[in-house]
């Protein structure tokens, strides 16, 4: 069925159309980063590199970008550890409430951002502030990690379900302790899943605005910086430039991850 | 013991940071606000929920939000499937790699910038009308249709990736066997591909549905109608009516919990 | 047997922990800090009510930083327009580095202030009393702000910035919510709000009005002129009958509204992109549109009068940099700076000496800065409360009612 010419042609057409759909707004953004006027009307009157110069020179944007990267790395790191642990536990052991764990873990991402944001804001005000932890980068990381865990959890769980346990058991039989088994057997198997999950988790954290609004306080992540600078007419083209730069920069980690997570294609003929 | 050690940190995190705060939030839905001083009055009351049920506008807003979230999910599923199938089964390895990158890259560009780009496309003198006016047509402009369109756009990668992952697990040999046994295209699709892909579609739908349910930024920018998120957000500020906001916030939670239960039944958690 | 017991015990423990946390948080949260602690010596300041109420008694050295919440255009550091910068000279003078978060509406500003992460806010009248009632701001010792002496009397000791004789902020400036139209589409210059309320309007679905509950007051202003038998006097003190009339008018208007604008940028883009041709606005948007030169707009204050705002700089009760905040308050209301701000944003300055210092010589005339008769027609934003302030007693609608009604109006 897959080999039929007509089917392949249809699929190719559908794919191309979808790609056009996905990249249309991005094309608009790129176009407008060269806009001669700061006004957001169509069509563009003229082109200029002026905004690119200003954006590269803009300390506010740089700081916000750095903050977002830091928050993303922090959240991804925490999610990595906790998500993997949870996935390992659920995969290996039978216990009451096992299904519920999957359910609970997905809750932060499944519930609307505004609910999570409000809940976290309340927690931070009532539980963290009295002990001295005020709104800032740490609370942002905490907030993001809460919904990044599910991404890692699902990726790791899916990978473990596809790999066989017999190697691990063999390793244990041969005398390795749990830590050694993990380091030499389990971890290499999981590595690519961790990478893929980590990328997605980082992307989620990097572009998150709703929960971050409630948990950031004075800290400015990139989405918050963008949100605030939309109020300033002269900053809008700079925002477009920053967005284009981020897309271009993101090509690098995504490409690397894609290379590293290529399946060996057991299930494919080609 | 090992189990305990493995489970303790993640569970501890979830409990303290999240479930506890959710509990606090929903308890406050039963409180009210003193209209003169603005202070929280901690006597339990069902007043907020009664207002929600009795005033038609809140039912209308809920209906609109859930309806559009469902429409978005459907549109995303329909759009994602062909491209995911192509990536998983037809494309060469190199093409597949390129396509994955092409789909993931928009995730990194700012949400707000993408929505403003859609404003440029949809506005009266914008891209759509510019393209369509020679044919005498016009674009959808702003409104609920625009919201549906923008949501469909924003969450599409979240639908493509799970479906792609799910279809990847479908062995080619199965498809060949099906056609060897005489199943034509549509039959193979219905009997072989769909059952395996369906949990993946449901898994992706969890993202698209929940993300649409709680968003308030996009509706404000491309429409003048209200969504659940708008009402919740509006009631937190000057109105200072946190209990009412919390009460209305229970609606998407209930909807999502029901959705998740159905999804689990359909095997989505295995497919993520 | 014992296994089952263990399982159940596990779940019971889980439920207990969650419930316990919830109760704990419920008990602790909400009922917070009593009034702000007073810094400085309380004794020896005989007639200063502000200090007695909790304001600080003196200004020490700058803390090196200042975190503000402000309206777009109030805190300009050269990034919008290199010529427009009064933050850099401030930082050079005081060493306080300014971080500003732009608020889109009063609700958001109140929410931000409640987090306690900011030192000060430029609060409009509909936010200021809320902030006072919520203990989110503390009294301001106006004796510590030398330029306060030159503020025009009409802005001093007003209900929205002074409570029982205690000052809660420094006036920033005031302005009106005006009517703006696209000259290419609206050929005859309108002079009445009626153009926005006409059910048969030729501009149907291209009308742009402010998207927040306080807009109900605009309907009340219109009704005050067109339906005098309703007896509306203050558009923020509406009893049941008056409120219902305003809400009905707005529900009718809903049919012709194209946009409930949430922030200046969106409205600017709407006008320039052709989606809106007439509506309510701030002078700020008109200025930016003029500078963009895509379309030509006209503005006016309609004959029925209008709502407006009078903004006050207030200091957070949890301010971490109070000295810098006092320095800022003095700076922003100093003659030259106040003139610059007023010209940039498009409003009447608070400082009586600023009118002589504006770059455009008729700025104050255009904005009626010294025209009290004009501002008698401008009903500045204030928080609706149930106390009508007259012989009707507690019969008026408070903001929670306004918010709920607004949700119903927008649909």
Image (cartoon, coloured by chain):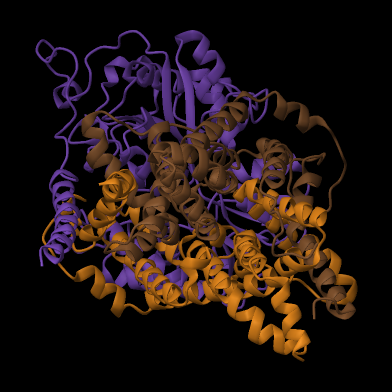
Q: Position of residue B89 (x, y in %)?
A: 75, 68
Drawing shade for chain A: brown
User: In the image shown, does A114 or A260 lie closer to the viewer?
Assistant: A260
Q: Position of residue C217 (x, y in %)?
A: 40, 59
Q: Residue visible at 25% across and 51% down? A: B20
Report the side of C165 relative to B154 (left or right): left
- Residue C211: in sight, yes or no? yes
Report the side of C361 relative to C41 (left or right): right
Looking at the colours in the rendered structure, which chain would you say is drawn in orange? B
Quick check: C343 above or below B137? above
Quick check: C88 above or below C185? above
Report the side of A238 relative to C248 (left or right): right
User: In the image shown, does C404 or B270 lie closer to the viewer?
Assistant: B270
Question: In the rendered image, which quarter contains the C terminus of chain A?
Answer: bottom right
The image quarter in which residue A234 lies: top right
Quick check: A24 above or below B63? above
Looking at the colours in the rendered structure, which chain would you say is drawn in purple? C
Question: In the rendered image, which quarter contains the N terminus of chain A?
Answer: bottom right
Q: Position of residue C42 (x, y in %)?
A: 12, 15
């Amino acid at each position: 069925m897959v080999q039929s010419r007509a089917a392949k042609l249809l699929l190719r057409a559908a794919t191309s159309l979808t790609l056009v759909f996905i990249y249309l707004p991005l094309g608009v953004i790129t176009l407008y980063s060269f806009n001669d006027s700061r006004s957001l009307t169509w069509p563009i009157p003229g082109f200029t590199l002026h905004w690119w110069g200003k954006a590269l020179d803009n300390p506010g944007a740089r700081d916000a970008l750095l903050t977002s990267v830091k928050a993303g790395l922090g959240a991804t790191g925490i999610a990595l550890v906790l998500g993997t642990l949870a996935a390992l536990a659920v995969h290996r052991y039978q216990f009451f409430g096992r299904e519920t764990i999957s359910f609970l873990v997905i809750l932060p991402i499944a519930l609307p951002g505004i609910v999570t944001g409000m809940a976290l804001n309340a927690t931070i005000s009532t539980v963290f502030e009295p002990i001295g932890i005020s709104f800032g980068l740490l609370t942002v990381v905490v907030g993001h990690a809460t919904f990044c865990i599910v991404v890692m959890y699902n990726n790791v769980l899916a990978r473990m379900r596809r790999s066989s346990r017999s190697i691990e058991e063999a390793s244990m039989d041969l005398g390795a302790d749990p830590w050694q088994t993990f380091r030499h057997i389990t971890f290499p198997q999981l590595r690519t899943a961790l990478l893929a999950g980590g990328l997605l988790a980082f992307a989620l954290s990097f572009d998150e605005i709703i929960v971050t609004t409630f948990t950031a306080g004075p800290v400015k992540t990139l989405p918050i910086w963008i949100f605030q600078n939309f109020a300033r007419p002269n900053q809008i083209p700079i925002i477009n430039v920053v967005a284009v730069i981020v897309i271009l920069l993101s090509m690098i980690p995504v490409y690397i991850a894609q290379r590293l997570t290529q399946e060996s294609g057991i299930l494919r003929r080609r | 013991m090992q189990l305990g050690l493995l489970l303790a940190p993640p569970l501890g995190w979830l409990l303290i940071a999240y479930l506890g705060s959710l509990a606090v939030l929903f308890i406050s839905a039963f409180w009210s606000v003193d209209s003169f001083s603005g202070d929280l009055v901690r006597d339990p009351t069902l007043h907020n929920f009664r207002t929600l049920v009795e005033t038609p506008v809140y039912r209308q807003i809920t209906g609109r939000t859930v309806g559009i979230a469902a429409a978005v999910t459907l549109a995303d599923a329909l759009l994602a499937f062909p491209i995911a199938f192509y990536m998983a089964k037809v494309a060469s390895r190199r093409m597949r790699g390129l396509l994955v990158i092409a789909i993931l890259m928009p995730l990194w560009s700012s949400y707000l910038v993408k929505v403003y780009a859609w404003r440029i496309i949809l506005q009266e003198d914008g891209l759509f009308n510019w393209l369509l006016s020679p044919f005498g047509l016009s674009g959808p402009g702003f409104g609920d249709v625009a919201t549906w369109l923008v949501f469909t756009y924003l969450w599409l990668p979240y639908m493509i990736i799970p479906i792609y992952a799910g279809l990847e697990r479908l062995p080619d040999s199965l498809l060949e066997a099906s056609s060897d046994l005489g199943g034509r295209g549509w039959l193979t699709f219905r009997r072989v591909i769909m059952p395996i892909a369906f949990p993946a579609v449901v898994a992706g739908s969890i993202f698209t549905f929940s993300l649409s349910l709680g968003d308030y930024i996009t509706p404000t920018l491309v429409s003048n109608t209200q969504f659940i998120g708008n009402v919740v957000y509006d009631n937190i500020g000057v109105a200072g009516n946190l209990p009412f906001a919390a009460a209305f916030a229970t609606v998407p939670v209930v909807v999502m919990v029901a959705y998740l239960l159905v999804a689990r039944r359909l095997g989505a958690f295995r497919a993520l | 047997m014992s296994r089952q017991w263990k399982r159940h015990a596990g779940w019971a423990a889980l439920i207990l922990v969650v419930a316990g946390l919830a109760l704990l948080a419920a008990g602790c949260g909400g009922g917070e800090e009593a009034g702000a602690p007073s810094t400085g010596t309380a004794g020896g300041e005989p007639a200063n009510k502000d200090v007695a109420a909790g304001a600080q008694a003196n200004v020490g050295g700058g803390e090196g930083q200042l975190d503000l919440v402000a309206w777009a255009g109030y805190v300009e550091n050269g990034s919008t327009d290199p010529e427009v910068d009064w933050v850099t000279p401030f930082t050079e003078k005081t060493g306080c580095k300014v971080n500003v978060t732009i608020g889109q509406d009063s609700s958001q500003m109140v929410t931000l202030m409640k987090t306690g992460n900011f030192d000060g806010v430029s609060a409009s009248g509909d936010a200021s009393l809320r902030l006072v009632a919520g203990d989110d701001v503390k009294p301001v010792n106006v004796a510590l702000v030398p330029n306060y002496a030159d503020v025009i009397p009409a802005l001093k000791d007003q209900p929205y910035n002074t409570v029982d004789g205690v000052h809660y902020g420094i006036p920033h400036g005031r302005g009106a919510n005006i009517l703006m139209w696209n000259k290419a589409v609206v050929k005859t210059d309108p002079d009445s709000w009626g153009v926005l309320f006409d059910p048969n309007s030729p501009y149907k679905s291209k009308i742009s009005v402010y998207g927040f509950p306080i807009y109900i007051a605009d309907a009340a202003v219109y009704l005050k002129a067109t339906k005098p038998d309703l007896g509306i006097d203050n558009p923020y003190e509406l009893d049941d009958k008056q409120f219902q009339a305003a809400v009905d008018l707005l529900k009718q208007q809903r049919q012709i509204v194209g946009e409930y604008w949430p922030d200046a940028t969106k409205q600017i883009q709407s006008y320039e992109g052709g989606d809106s041709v007439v509506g309510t606005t701030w002078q700020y948007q008109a200025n930016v549109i003029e500078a963009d030169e895509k379309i030509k707009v006209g503005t006016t204050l309609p004959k029925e009068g209008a709502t407006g705002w009078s903004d006050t700089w207030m200091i957070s009760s949890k301010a971490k940099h109070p000295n810098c905040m006092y320095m800022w308050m003095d700076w922003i209301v100093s003659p030259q700076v106040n003139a610059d701000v007023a010209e940039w944003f498009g409003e009447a300055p608070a400082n009586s000496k600023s009118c002589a210092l504006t770059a455009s010589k008729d700025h104050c005339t255009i904005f009626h800065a010294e025209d009290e008769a004009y501002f008698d027609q401008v009903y500045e934003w204030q928080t609706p409360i149930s106390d009508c302030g007259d012989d009707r007693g507690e019969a008026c609608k408070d903001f929670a009612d306004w918010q709920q009604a607004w949700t119903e109006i927008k649909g």
